[in-house]
Amino acid sequence: MNWQSLYSARRTGDAKDKVINPDAVRDSFLRDYDRLIFSSAFRRLQNKTQVFPLPGAVFVHNRLTHSLEVASVGRSLGKAVGEQIAQQNSNEDANFIEFYKYGLSSVISAACLAHDIGNPPFGHSGEDAIRTFFRELDGEAKETLHAALSENQRYDFEKFEGNSNALRILTDSFNETEPGGYRLTYTTLASIVKYPCSSLQGFKKTGLIATKKSGFFDSEIPVYEAIAGTLGIPKKEGYDNVYARHPFVYLTEAADDICYRIIDLEDAHRLHIVSLEKIQSLFYPFFEMEKTPYRSIEYIKKKVNNIVDDNQKVQFIRASWIGLMVEKLSALFMQHEAELLAGTLEKDLLSCLPDEYAGLIKEINTYSIKHIYNYKSVVEIEIAGYNVIGGLLKAFVNAVLYPTHSKSDKILKLVSSQFPISRDPARLYYDIQSVVDFISGMTDLYAIDLYRKITGISVPQIR
């Protein structure tokens, strides 16, 4: 791979002979950002769980506020890296310099906006609920799916992945005639796909970061092939549908990794789950190794001690730590430039930090898992997610599998026309995809409301 071919203004749905016309006000990548932030799929993230249940008396992050903050950090990373690439390649043409100085930050911030757009309701437990439902099918339903679907298609459901679903949401036209879905640039889309492999190839310990999970469903293989072909992303040798990561993915991932490690703790502090002292003990050591005056531990402590409100103290620690990590990870990106372009960097940027930071990151991870991700209310909403999503899938998937049953026709009428159900046995994969598209796109509240109504827990009113 090379920096010259890794960006393109070509979009999904473009005709092969289309001439890319520049916009005098917004370049193609800023338009990607705008298309995402005005989209209904992005707005629905405001009612999808990040970690803690919502809404509550104390406002905590949801998927939308998290994504906005990740986009802000991603923009800084893109700006820092882009300026260095432009400076090191100052002999390149004006378009190259323009993209890396100004366009890359828009690409990364847009990718960050969309990085969670494929996540179903109820956080990561929503993904697990979908996987569990399809893995635990038995009897006639299991036999029907095994007979009608390829192994890769079955794994799209049995190993359902929000990352793969994001690419589908952004590129599929569903029931519309205009091709290309959101019609984003190949560059932005490639920057979202953290695990560029199919469901069948993913979730395997191969030593490749690309196969940790999956990045595209069976239905989107041609889409990613077109992206990879245009941008010069190579396939991994010996694999059918596994590609090297696009270098920009590391920046999108880094922005997310930085944010959730500190922001989930900030939310926990506001909810009185974590003390200020604990947050100080987790993050102060990062500054003890800094020599720059405004990054030194003495400076950080002095600033924090001069703040009256504890929430404001945590906010200052958060802002300072994010700034430090942006500085370090953007520098690491350039240090690993050769591996990134060769497609051989098999770990995320946070894992590339020097050894003295590894223990500190591990301590944050260990504490968060024990005291935040297994906190009672978090576990409760995960269990609720299993029941709600499992119940919805049971009703709608059974209606697809047994369309002649009297109840099935009524159930399928509840599916939005955006998600077509053909009722053709030869198109069973696509009909089940429509059901999963419908359910995974729901907000937490809508999923609960629909579940209550179709199970008779609450009786719908005439509207």
Image (cartoon, rainbow, N blue to C red):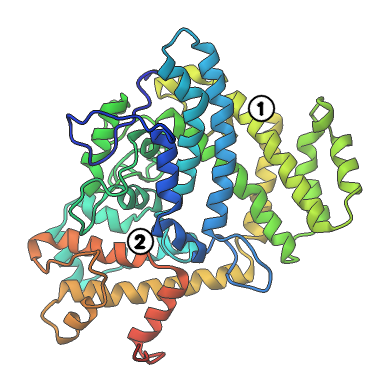
Snapshot quadrant of residue 225: top left
Q: Which mark is residue 326?
A: none
Q: Residue 408 location in percent, x, y?
A: 18, 80
Which quadrant, please, contains the C terminus? bottom left
Between 442 and 76, the one lying in front of the other is 76
Between 59 and 196, the one lying in front of the other is 59
Classify mark 1: residues with Cα within 10 Å, few (<14), some (14-19) or many (20+). few
**Position above or below: 275 against 210:** below
Q: Is residue 207 visible?
A: no
**Position above or below: 373 against 230:** below
Q: Residue 378 location in percent, x, y?
A: 58, 67
Residue depicted at 47% across the width and 60% down the height: 45
Q: Which residue is mark 1?
A: 354
Q: Are marks 1 and 2 in contact (CB under 8 Å)?
A: no
Q: Residue 228 location in percent, x, y?
A: 29, 30
In terms of secondary structure, where does tag 2 sit? helix
Locate residue 202 relative to residue 45 in the image: left or right.
left
Residue depicted at 71% across the width and 30% down the height: 356
Residue type marked 2? Arg
Residue type marked 1? Pro
Locate residue 372 relative to residue 190 in the image: left or right.
right
Q: Which residue is mark 2?
A: 131
Q: Most extreme residue toward the front, as rendered? A: 24
